[in-house]
Image: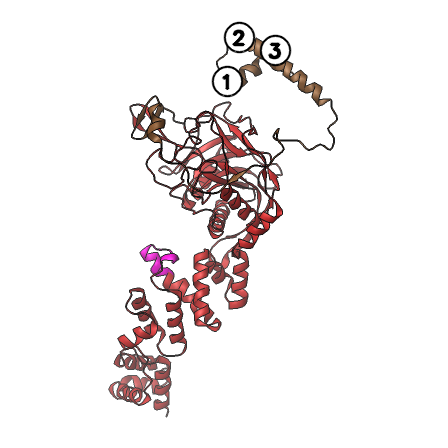
Amino acid sequence: MSLNLEQVFRAARLARLAISDAEAERTAAQLNNIFALIEQMQAVDTTGVEPMSHAVDLAQRLRPDAVTEADRRADFQAIAPETEAGLYLVPKVIE
Amino acid sequence: MQWEVVIGLETHAQLATESKIFSGAATAFGAEPNIQACGVDIALPGVLPVLNRKAVECAIRFGLAVGGEVAPRSVFARKNYFYPDLPKGYQISQFEEPVVSGGQLVIRVGQGAEAVEKTVRLTRAHLEEDAGKSLHEDFHGKSGIDLNRAGTPLLEIVSEPDMRSSQEAVAYARALHALVRWIGICDGNMQEGSFRCDANVSVRRKGAEKLGTRREIKNLNSFRFLQQAIDYEVQWQIGVLEDGGKIEQATVLFNPDTGETRAMRSKEDAHDYRYFPDPDLLPLVIDAAWKDQVRAELPELPDAMRARFARDYGLSAYDAATLTAALELARFYESCVAAAGRELAKPCANWVMVDLAARLNRAELDISHSPITAQQLAGLVRRIADGTISNAMGKKVFDALCNGEGADADAVIEAQGLRQMNDSGALEALVDAAIAGNPRSVEEYRAGKEKAIQALVGQVMKASKGKANPQQVNELLRARLKP
């Protein structure tokens, strides 16, 4: 499997990354190297091996359902570009 | 052309927890903007999610209640998209390995005794976090973002496309709504967005195997809108197809003001969420012991209780279904029967379903705020059954108890002198007076006009101020007028 330039641009667009043609070429080459590595790994016989969803073989720790966080809105909003009436303001987004 | 409608629902039930699914911020509704959004919820760099045990327990409850499979191991995944009310740039959800798979829900379609049962299969239910809220009122041409809701735990419940009409879809939504409240995992408050539905709707020619292309109606937060939106959408799709057009897969919004559905501006990449397992979260492991413990704590489920009411109390299927519409109602009824005696189960059902329901309805109260207790109602039912008061007087006692005019039925009956007349001498005097005072009715009755006796009964009842037993009056009159 290998990626073409169009797919690289699409992936970049989905991640909201603006990349130049030169960067796209470079990225495509790097990604295709990774795919080559994956292909190599695919050759290993993994019959009967459970796929892992995480590198660490542990179970998720759970916390009790309790409110432990106090209101820190003032601190958080001090570094926000724009706020009003307790809201964060962002460029208009409406569907 | 005959068309068949195919509907599947995706429902988001907000789980009844105190804190968020991955953080210790509060979930209370109606707080000032952004005061319940901590560093995890607003996605400050370096924060990590820690899963709320109660949210998982709610999912287990649901899985057990619908007879689904609760996965011994499930995985959280990132659903990637950009929107300002989603600060991380992804929503933590479950994708390939959800916490609950399968299960089913029995629904009742139609009204009263004509209702038909149908089983709707469930595909899955998975845990996820809610997004924040965007406010598009005018903030100088900008949008305002409130992240209080970000990270609120949701259970997304996905049905199979088993419904064939908007009525069935509403019946399913109602049954699901009742169930999540019954098992205490969601408050079901639709105005506050605690229970909202997306409907996947398609149509196909009757008899066709292949499903038509579906459109998804988003965010329906009332049963009425659900029905209206589906009805409109179905007519629209049939119209397009009959005009030789094609349905494009799309996400649509329902406008309650116009009653129409409208496609959202479609973005070509909108549905490429690039799910992958969230490296910040380890697999969720639910062992058999935890499942057993949750099972032991589950209340008797509505279907089982309905069957028991019909069997043990001799109620009709309709009565049993009505009384098990909500857990609080069913519990109220059972306390009433327990206090009145099982032989009075039917009159208890009538009082709860008719008089009490009407009163609650008028006052816009639910059963947990009933103005009369189950014990008070039981006392009233017993006094009617043992002949102390007539049914008509019972209504007076009921109103008095609801208005707080007495501790129990006996107190009200004594205080207001409502006891049925059982002094037969006094009653006979009234009967004789009625016969003497209404020669015409007497004559008519003697001439064979059966109905004339009712006029005489009425006179006696009036003279007794309603305290006579009408049946007893009737018998006395007939005896007196016997030739």
Q: Secondary structure at mark 2?
A: helix
Is B158 in front, or is B6?
B158
Mark 3 belongs to chain = A
Is B156 in front, or is B223?
B156
Mark 2 vs mark 3: in front: 3
Q: Which mark is residue A62?
A: none
Instruction: Tell me the CA gap for discs 2 and 1.
Output: 13 Å
Q: Which residues are magenta?
A: B357-369
Q: Residues within 10 Å of mark 1 (few under 14, many from 20)?
A: few
Q: Which mark is residue A21?
A: 2
Q: Are marks 2 and 1 on the same chain?
A: yes
Q: Residues within 10 Å of mark 2 (few under 14, many from 20)?
A: few
Amino acid at the residue labelled 2: Asp
The answer to which of marks 2 and 1 sits earlier in the sequence is 1
Please indicate whether residue A59 sits to the left or right of residue B329 in the image: right
Residue lying at 36% horizontally and 73% vertically, measured from the top left: B391
Magenta run includes residue B363: yes
The chain that appears red in the image is B
The reply to whether the C-beta atoms of the residues labelled 2 and 3 are less than 8 Å apart is no
Please indicate whether residue B46 sits to the left or right of residue B73 in the image: left
Query: Which residue is the site of mark 3?
Result: A29
The chain that appears brown in the image is A
